[in-house]
Amino acid sequence: MAALMNYQETIDYLFAKLPMFSRIGAAAFKKDLTNTQKLCDFLGDPYKRFKSIHVAGTNGKGSVSHMLAAILQTSGYKTGLYTSPHLKDFRERIKINGEMVTEKFIVDFTERIKTISENIEPSFFEITVAMAFEYFAEQKIDIAVIETGLGGRFDSTNIITPELSVITNIGWDHMNILGNSLEKIAFEKAGIIKQNTPVVIGEVLAETEKVFNDVAKEKNAALSIASNKRQAINWHWKKHELIVEVTQEHRTDHQLYHLDLPGLCQTKNLITVLDTCSHLHQRGWNIEEQNIRAGLQHTKKLTGLHGRWETIHLHPLVVLDVAHNEDGIKMLMEQIEVTDHDHLHIVLGLVKDKELEKILVLFPRLADYYFTRADIPRALDTVILKEKANKMGLKGEIYPDVNMAIKAALSKATTRDMVLVCGSVFLVGEVNTPL
């Protein structure tokens, strides 16, 4: 009998054996849920043994998922959190109360499903979803926050029937898979709306509102648009916290929330999270206002979230951000405008399936650029990146990896400058911290 694999061998086996979206792109994405269902059938449908919240959206779904998990955890619930991709360690994808899944569980689980997985050849994502569901069921959690990988309708996570569905927003991303109009992308994300299950939409556009209303009506799902109920009317930074003033319809008093995720985009995510909490409260979940405040103020500490306007060095200021599509980069550029610095240095690496021109046009011409790439096949070649960027008036040099690019930026930057690392989750994941 073959010896059991150790943890590193197991991870290598999973990465090598299974088509992975982060490695190969669209070819890894399957438009059906058959394999996930077969794996879960084999495991005895673990996802039916715990309650869940399902989160989709173009931007902000990771932050919203982590904030919700932190709030539920602070409210005393044993909370599972499934997100993707990971930055440094595969185990970041599956957490309970901020603690990563054990190496032993991953080894045992992979061994247990080896026969069926060699028979049905699931994708990397299908396996990790089944793994998360089994871990959460085994650990007898109270509730899990489940983030979709891509889209919604055909996403492997979409076999669950949650307490509540959440769609943060719709923007341009993964058009090669989800469709080339905002309506089509919205329809794919709306695929997580379930029969008789309420849905919270963070914000809508003229093109997407009708899609959500139609799907919700068809599924008899009560629909709530968070941005119609509350507004973030003011914000400022204090000691690495974002302090946001929120107004609510039918209430005259304003609320102040302290967030340890300091990115400007979090003002929108906060509104989505607050509406979700009030719906959970209506459904009998014991979430008090003080739990919401504490969860938001300690999201990073409670859940281990990284890469969202994350400061890793001061003087010069070095910030990591996983923004990688048009709307995400727009928000990032707004943030830079209100951040105090003399000169800007941007370490940039993208993946191949992005609309380059639409993204590059958003970057400032007055910055110095350090073009690089993540160590994955899907990363865009640095020569092509530099060439396209040059046409947009963005000037800089090529570096073989992100850490060499950061080193070069630091050697040029003064203490009053700012270095931003962005363009891809995988690029940010390869940064060696601390500097």
Image: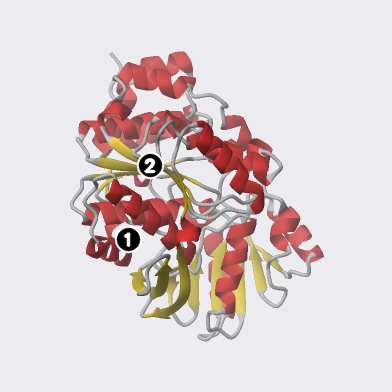
Q: Is 404 located above or below residue 377 in the figure?
A: below
Q: Is 186 located above or below residue 126 in the figure?
A: below
Residue type, numbered disc 2 = Leu
* Residue farthest along the right direction in this orientation: 391
Closer to viewer: mark 1 or mark 2: 2
Residue bearing the label numbered 1:
299
N-terminal of the pair, mark 1 or mark 2, is 2
Q: Quadrant of residue 324?
A: bottom right
Picture coordinates of residue 369 (x, y %)?
Answer: 66, 69
- Labels 1 and 2 touching (C-beta < 8 A): no
- Report whether residue 377 is seen: no
Picture coordinates of residue 7 (x, y %)?
Answer: 31, 35
Please state if 171 lies on the left or on the right of 98 as rendered.
Answer: right
- Residue under the image location 54 percent in, 52 percent down: 169
Please state if 84 lies on the left or on the right of 260 as rendered.
Answer: right
- Residue under the image location 73 percent in, 64 percent down: 361
Please state if 273 lies on the left or on the right of 137 as rendered.
Answer: right
Q: For numbered disc 2, what is the local secondary structure?
A: strand
Which quadrant is the N terminus positioned in?
top left
Q: Quadrant of residue 93?
A: top left
